[in-house]
Structures are given as C-alpha cells and as structure tokens.
Image (cartoon, helix red, strand yellow):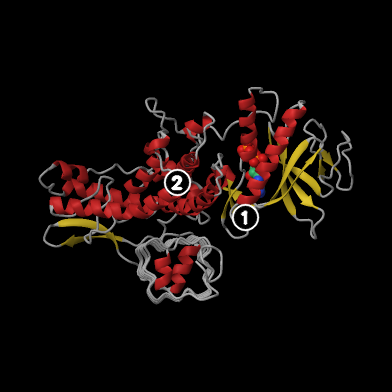
Amino acid sequence: MSYCVNPSCTQPKNPNNVQVCQSCGTPLRLNNRYQPLGILGKGGFGATFGAADLSLPGTPICVVKQLRPATDDPNVFKMAKELFEREASTLAQVGVHPQVPQLLDYFEQDQQFYLVQEYIKGHNLHQEIKKNGPLTEAGVKQFLSELLPILQFIHSQKVIHRDIKPANLIRSQKDKKLVLIDFGAVKNQVNSMVASNNSPQTAFTAFAVGTAGFAPPEQMAMRPVYASDIYAVGVTAVYLLTGRSPKDIGCDPDTGEIAWEPYVDISDSLSKVLKKMLEISVKHRYKSAEEVLDALAMAPYEEGMQHSMTTMITGFSSPTSSGKIGLSSGGRSQGEFSTGISRVSMNTEISAKQSHRRTPEATPISRIHTEVKQPRSIAATTPASAKGPTNWAANGGQGMAQSTKKRRGNTSESTTVETPTKWKTKTLLSAYQQGRRDFAQQKLENLDLHQANLPGISFYNSCLSRVNLESSELSRADFGRTSLTDFNGKNANFSEAYFGYADLTGADLRGANLYGANFKYANLTGANLCGADLSFAQITPAQLEAAKTNWRTVMPSGKKGFW
Ligand SMILES: Nc1ncnc2c1ncn2[C@@H]1O[C@H](COP(=O)(O)OP(=O)(O)OP(=O)(O)O)[C@@H](O)[C@H]1O
C-alpha cells in the first residue's frame, strides 16, 4: 500500500504500484525515495508515517515525520525553515546515542518539512503496563537506571526533550533496550517563535508544550529547563508503579503537587527520590539526571544509617516507619529492593507480630520507628495478568523462599527473614522461565549458569561468588550489593546492568558487554576487563585503575583503551 500524505485527502490508501494519489493527485513518493505505507499518528503540526526507504536494499522501514507550517507569510516560512534545519541538526546530534532514534534524512517538499528517523520496533511502556500491569519497586529502579543516563546524554547536548512519557519510551524488540522517541524540539521551538512573534496564525500551529500531567508548570508556561524532563520522568515512574495516568491520580489542591503517594507501596528511600523529582518548584527539584542517579545510589546507605541511629537510640533493631525490619548488621532494610508482593507479605507478618510484642518504652523516636503501615491489598492494584509469567517485574513473589522468624541476641526482638533457598541451576532457570525475576538475598555460589538467558533478573544483595555466567544474557540485571568475587562473566551481556556497591574482586569480565552498566561504588580490584565494552558505563578512573584493561577495552568514552 502507498499512503497519501496530504492531510485533506479523503482516500489516502492507494495501491502499492501507483506514483500519485488516485484520489487527490499528491505524489506518493517523498524526496523520490520514501514510500509512505501508513499513518502512525496525527497532530495539529502534521503527521507521522511508517515508510519504506526504496533507495536501500531490502527497502527498510523508517519513520517519516511531516511538519506543516500553517502560514502564507513568506518571511515567517523562511524563519520556520531555518529553525527546522537547525533543529534537524540537533536531532542528528542526539540521534548518535544508541537509545535515541537516528535521524536519517530531512528535506522540504511542497512547502512541508520532513524528518526521517530510524524505526524502533517494539512496544512502548504505556502498552507494556496496560498488558502486564504495574511494575514493582525494583522494576521502577531498573527503569530509572536505564532512562536517566539517556537524559544525562541529551542534556549534555543542550537538548531538553520536553515530552517524556510512557508512550514515548519504546522497549526495542531487537535488544530489549529502552529508546526515547519523539523529540518535541522542532514543534516547540517553532511554537516559541510563534509566541514571540505574537502572531498565532503565522508558523506551525502552536501546540502543547509537552503532555498535560507529565509536563511541569514551568514548561506549561513555555519556560522549560533541564529539570522539566526530570519531573516528567518522575510522573512516568509513578505511572509505571501505579498503572494510573496523572489525570487519574489528581493533585493536592493546596500545593498543586500530584497526589501519588497513597497509590504506591514503596520504600521510603525511593519515595523520597520521587518526591524530589516531582517538586513543583524547580528550585527544590533535582537539577540533573546525575543528581537523581546519585540519590538512588545513596538511598540504601541513608536508610542503613537511619536504621543504625535507631538501633543506637533504642538499643535494638526495630521496624522502620514504613514497616520494614532492619537487619542486625545495620545494613539496608530487608526487602527494600524486593517486589511489592514480597513486601506486602512481610508487612503483614510484622503487623501480626506487633500486637503480641511488648513495646519498648515509648520514646518519640521508637514511636516513629515502630509505626506500622497497613498493608495494601495487592490484588486491588495488580491486574490478574500481572501475575502471569509474562510479567517480568510484578511477580517476584512467586516461589519466594519461606519466611521464618528468628530470635536475635538477648533482646527477644524478633524479625522476619527469608530463608535462602538452596538453588540449583535447573531450579533457578525454571523459576525464571515461570516469571520470577527477584532472586535478591540468595546464596548462589558456584552455580553453573553459562549461556543462561536471564535479562532483567535481580540478584540484589545475593552471593554469586565463583558463579559461571559465561556468555549469558543479563542485560538490565540488578547486581546491586552482590558478591561477585571470582565469578566468570566472560563474553556475557551485562548491558545496562546495575553493579552499585557490588564486590567484583577478581571477577573475569573479559569480552563482556558492559554497555551503560552502573558500577557506582563497586569494588573492581583485580577484575579482568580486557576486551570488555564499557561504552556509557558509569565507572570511575580509580575503579578502572584497580581493574585490568587492555587496548581492546572500550572505555566509557566509546574509545578503545582510552579513558
Ligand atoms: N522512531 C520511531 N519508531 C517507532 N515508532 C515511532 C517512532 N517515532 C514515533 N513513533 C510512533 O508513531 C506514533 C506517532 O508519533 P508522534 O510522535 O508523531 O505523535 P504522537 O506521540 O501521537 O503525538 P505527540 O508528538 O503530540 O506526542 C506513536 O505511536 C509513536 O509511538
């Protein structure tokens, strides 16, 4: 089929072999090269088409965005054209990032402007949530650790996206990477021009500056800043956690803030980060993607410190304000990175315990820390489909190890800990195949998992010393605080995996794909990174110094053997 790009054509569908529209006579080839096949979306500024590039072997599919300047004034048209060209070069600049569609071409035809982009095959996050249900806390953290580095990159190129929302984030079918689409820069730039010209009829039709509910107030007032994208990422994270759009959540009538907190059941640390991302005032919001990544990386430490202080003051470990129980080591609260399902079951247990326990002298602090949040019914918020095996994040509760109660020291304080399951290669692979993704706090030493296909798995705070993961698929896996000493990760795919605070002493990562991996505060002493790909990885020169690298190692800069 050939699709007519004339917006007023009444019969845009044409047979494949015709050159001009049978209904309105508009040429069906753009720039003598692109054959529009169908419409993907339509707005006031133009439309977006899927098209075949006839000039290339195999006629690959691409995306053609049409921009219509609604003007008869030649001066304004000239200005719009200049702006379009300038913006096309900006899009070309950000399109070098592998998680942004590449700009393939741009041209003008019949007084309309066209941008040609790489076509990203896959579902967007709006579709994924509709199909599989909301994500767990771990899933949302994973999402943030994937998206924020893209934001870091585009901001470093002095570009503000202005329309971040679930529908503009496609999970690429090819490599499962998240791709940020729809840079609204062109139409918004032109809109600003229209606004400054004070002649609303002159250029492209003036349209929304982002999407209502996702865009912050300063952007709606036509004053977007980098932090405007951070706000939109925050709203997107809330959508992923709740499955609700901002319009279905509502806002605080006094402050104008989106009132999302009653709809989620997440750790205090993530809640704090989201709150700051969603600050109405730019002054109080995170200023950069890096600040958010830092806050997320520090969050477990902060909770650990808070817990230690409680222990010092009350003399024993007690539940935190969110109902989680601290570990005796003073580390992070158990279950902090677990799925919503596992956390709910743990809270239930605490609630039951609380009624039997002798409460310590009620100092204000102990009162705060023994307050237990009512567990929310997961069934009320999670659709049945979310529990099915296709949901990669919401079903971590499946096959959870049994909970037991332990007495600690002579304090008679009891807590709930998960008894580590004795995992074998077969049981772990089969649990993963059945949909389980949460393998946090497990003992998995010496397992043979070579060539395993485990994308998105969470081994948070587990022990994987000497595990064989050679040539395995572990993109986006969570190895936060995991012990990976002397493990074999040769030629494995760890793209965008999280290794924050992990111990990788003596790890073998030769030839591994570590694209975009996050090594915040990880110990890489003696780790072998020869031939590994560290493009866009978050790793410091000191960490690289402590590890082994060679001329084949692709450094975060994208260059071989150079920092
Ligand atoms: N590079 C791309 N690869 C694959 N699909 C794309 C790409 N760019 C856009 N799309 C899809 O095309 C459709 C239309 O996109 P487009 O950005 O033109 O408009 P929109 O998102 O409907 O509106 P707006 O730009 O006002 O947000 C969307 O469904 C989007 O997912």
The tag on residue 96 is 1
Q: Position of residue 285 (x, y in %)?
A: 40, 39
Q: Is residue 185 left or right of residue 369?
A: right
Up-down relation of residue 114 to residue 459 (above or below):
above
> Mark 2 or mark 1, which is nearer the start of the sequence?
1
Q: Is residue 395 left or right of residue 85?
A: left
Q: Quadrant of ligand 1?
A: top right
Q: Three-letter amino acid code at disc 1?
A: Val
The tag on residue 288 is 2
| Residue at 12%, 43% in the rendered image | 362
Q: CA distance from mark 1 to mark 2?
A: 21 Å
| Residue at 10%, 45% in the rendered image | 361
Q: Position of residue 236 (x, y in %)?
A: 49, 42
SS under mark 2: loop
Q: Position of residue 527 (x, y in %)?
A: 42, 74
Q: How many numbered discs?
A: 2
